[in-house]
């Protein structure tokens, strides 16, 4: 019940925040710059306000504090750890967004600096979750209902790179109106269900519900044709949230099925670059990442979002089947 209430509160706050935030971003002239090598029809989106992720970040925070307050009084702070971790990535994205769209310059963090900062944030989060007893170095394997024992140092290294990879994969997925937010809604629902199955995970359910409500509220403004984009502010925050939820639930391998869209988008980018270099100029896809390839094949943005969201939902259903045995002994 608290999960549903968190979703409603987050939706309401996000929707209300959008009505104030979008005009402010317009006055700030925080307009999105469109890639020159992207589909030509995207040029019409130039000037659309970005950094809209701030609205669902506000909605999620309001919901987890308001709805999770009673648990917090009893020392259940896991949902705050997730938010704090995701917020670090959101700040990194905000700094880049602000420099690009307000100052029209790229004097923020370098790629290496961002990567190192993300690794440090990931390691700090993992150590905190270990200290709170919410994480083990035993790698749970869905479907097989077994665990692979790992040393803590090895696990932290593995986990830090998984987190950074997930964060940047979600960032790559944010390329057309409503895509990243839509495909992440089923992911939030999955973690809400897992939290309901697992005793003592109520606070994570509150966070997952707030995530779903915040994204649905954001889609009021972000669905095609978008009135605002989430920017790196929102996409890096979302990536941090998804990764943190997976590790907080102590099942990072579940990111493979629930994040199938993120993975395909990222792999299409990697394969495109690799194939281009190996063949001295030939392309494997019409354009990467994958959503641009389908755009150039004639798919509308609405169709793309619908199909990719359906794939994400199927991946989440598969993941749920894969972890049910952990809770019901199947």
Image (spheres, rainbow, N blue to C red):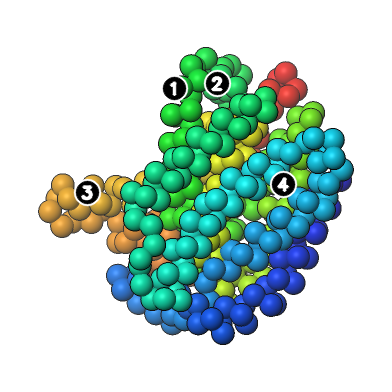
The correct choice, above or below, for 48 with respect to 117 in the image is: below
Q: Where is residue 107, by image quadrant?
A: bottom left
Q: Which mark is residue 154?
A: 1
Q: Are marks 2 and 4 in contact (CB under 8 Å)?
A: no
The percent coordinates of residue 284 (x first, y second) are: 26, 53
Lateral position of residue 23 relative to residue 194, left or right: left
Q: Residue at x 60, y 22 (%)?
A: 136
Q: Is residue 14 visible in this depiction of the protein?
A: yes
Residue named by callout 3: 275
Q: Which mark is residue 137?
A: 2
Q: Which callout, 3 or 1, points to the residue nearer the camera?
A: 1
Q: Are marks 2 and 1 in contact (CB under 8 Å)?
A: yes
Where disc 3 sits, the SS reads: helix
Q: Going from the N terminus, do you reach mark 2 or mark 1 first?
A: 2
Q: Are marks 1 and 4 in contact (CB under 8 Å)?
A: no
Q: Residue at x 65, y 48 (%)?
A: 83
CA–CA distance in space, label 1 to label 4: 28 Å
Q: Going from the N terminus, do you reach mark 2 or mark 4 first?
A: 2
The percent coordinates of residue 41 (x first, y second) are: 40, 78
Q: Which callout, 3 or 4, points to the residue nearer the camera?
A: 4
Q: Which callout, 3 or 2, points to the residue nearer the camera?
A: 2
Q: Going from the N terminus, do you reach mark 3 or mark 1 first?
A: 1
The percent coordinates of residue 71 (x first, y second) are: 83, 39
Q: Where is residue 320, by image quadrant?
A: top right
Residue named by callout 4: 207
Q: Is residue 224 visible in this depiction of the protein?
A: no
Q: Are marks 3 and 4 in contact (CB under 8 Å)?
A: no
Q: Residue at x 63, y 26 (%)?
A: 131
């Amino acid at each position: 019940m608290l999960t549903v209430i968190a979703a409603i509160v987050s939706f309401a706050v996000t929707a209300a925040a959008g009505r104030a935030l979008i005009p402010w971003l317009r006055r700030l002239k925080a307009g999105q710059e469109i890639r020159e090598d992207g589909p030509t029809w995207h040029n019409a989106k130039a000037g659309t306000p970005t950094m809209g992720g701030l609205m669902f970040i506000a909605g999620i925070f309001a919901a987890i504090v308001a709805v999770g307050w009673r648990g917090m009084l009893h020392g259940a702070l896991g949902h705050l750890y997730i938010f704090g971790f995701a917020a670090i990535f959101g700040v990194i994205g905000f700094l880049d967004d602000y420099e690009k769209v307000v100052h029209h310059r790229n004097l923020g963090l370098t790629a290496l600096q961002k990567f190192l900062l993300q690794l440090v944030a990931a390691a700090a989060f993992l150590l905190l979750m270990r200290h709170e007893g919410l994480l083990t170095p035993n790698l749970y394997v869905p479907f097989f209902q077994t665990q692979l024992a790992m040393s803590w140092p090895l696990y932290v290294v593995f986990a830090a790179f998984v987190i950074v990879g997930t964060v940047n994969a979600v960032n790559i997925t944010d390329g057309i109106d409503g895509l990243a937010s839509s495909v992440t809604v089923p992911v939030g629902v999955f973690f809400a269900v897992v939290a309901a199955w697992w005793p003592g995970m109520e606070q994570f359910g509150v966070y997952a519900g707030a995530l779903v409500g915040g994204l649905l509220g954001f889609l009021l403004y972000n669905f095609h044709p978008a009135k605002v984009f989430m920017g790196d502010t929102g996409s890096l925050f979302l990536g941090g949230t998804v990764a943190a939820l997976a590790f907080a639930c102590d099942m990072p391998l579940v990111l493979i099925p629930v994040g199938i869209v993120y993975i395909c988008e990222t792999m299409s980018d990697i394969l495109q670059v690799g194939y281009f270099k190996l063949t001295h100029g030939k392309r494997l896809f019409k354009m990467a990442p994958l959503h641009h390839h389908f755009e150039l094949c004639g798919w509308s943005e609405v169709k793309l979002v619908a199909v990719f969201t359906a794939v994400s939902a199927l991946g989440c259903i598969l993941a749920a089947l894969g972890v049910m045995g952990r809770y019901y002994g199947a």
